[in-house]
Image (tube, rainbow, N blue to C red):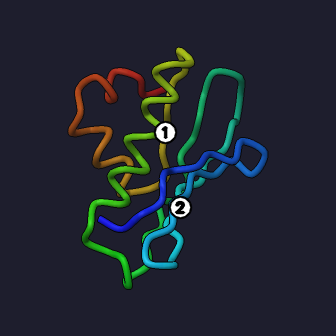
Amino acid sequence: MNASEITHDAARQRYSLIADGVEAYLTYERPRPGLRHITHTIVPDQIGGRGYGQRLVHRIMEDIIAAGERVSSACWYASALIEKTPDWAALKA
C-alpha cells in the first residue's frame, strides 16, 4: 500500500490521504456541537479498491469516539460501514 498517512484538516472539515500522487478524501459537517455529519467519501478510480475509503471512515470514527461525539451520514459508503460496525452504529444521531 503506497499511501500517505491520513491527515485531518479541521478548518476544511476534511480527512485526506495521497496514494500514487492521487488524493482520496472524506468530508463532513458539524451541524451542531457534538455531532459530525459525514457528507462524502471520495476515492478516485485510479486508486480504488485498495481500502482507502475504509481507512478514511475508520479514522473519522476513531476521532468521533475519542471526542465523545455522535455521527450521522449522507454518504452511502460511510453509512454502510457504520451500520456494519455495532460500536459505530450505536453512535448514530
Q: Amino acid at mark 1?
A: Ile
Q: Residue furthest right?
A: 11
Front residue of this view, candidates 73 and 28: 28
Percent across and percent down for residue 93 are 49, 26
Q: Quadrant of the N terminus?
A: bottom left
Say which residue label 1 marks: 60
Front residue of this view, candidates 23 and 30: 23
What residue appears at the point 36 percent right and 60 percent down from the top-left corner?
A: 52
Percent across and percent down for residue 26 are 53, 56
Q: Which structural element holds mark 1?
A: helix
Answer above or below: position of 39 versus 33: below
What residue appears at the point 36 percent right and 50 percent down from the top-left corner?
A: 55
Percent across and percent down for residue 7 are 58, 49
Examine the image and state in which quarter residue 81 appears.
Answer: top left
Describe residue 66's horizontal placement relative to residue 12 as left or right. left
Q: Amino acid at mark 2?
A: Tyr
Give me the disc on residue 25.
Answer: 2
What residue appears at the point 53 percent right and 46 percent down from the top-left corner?
A: 38
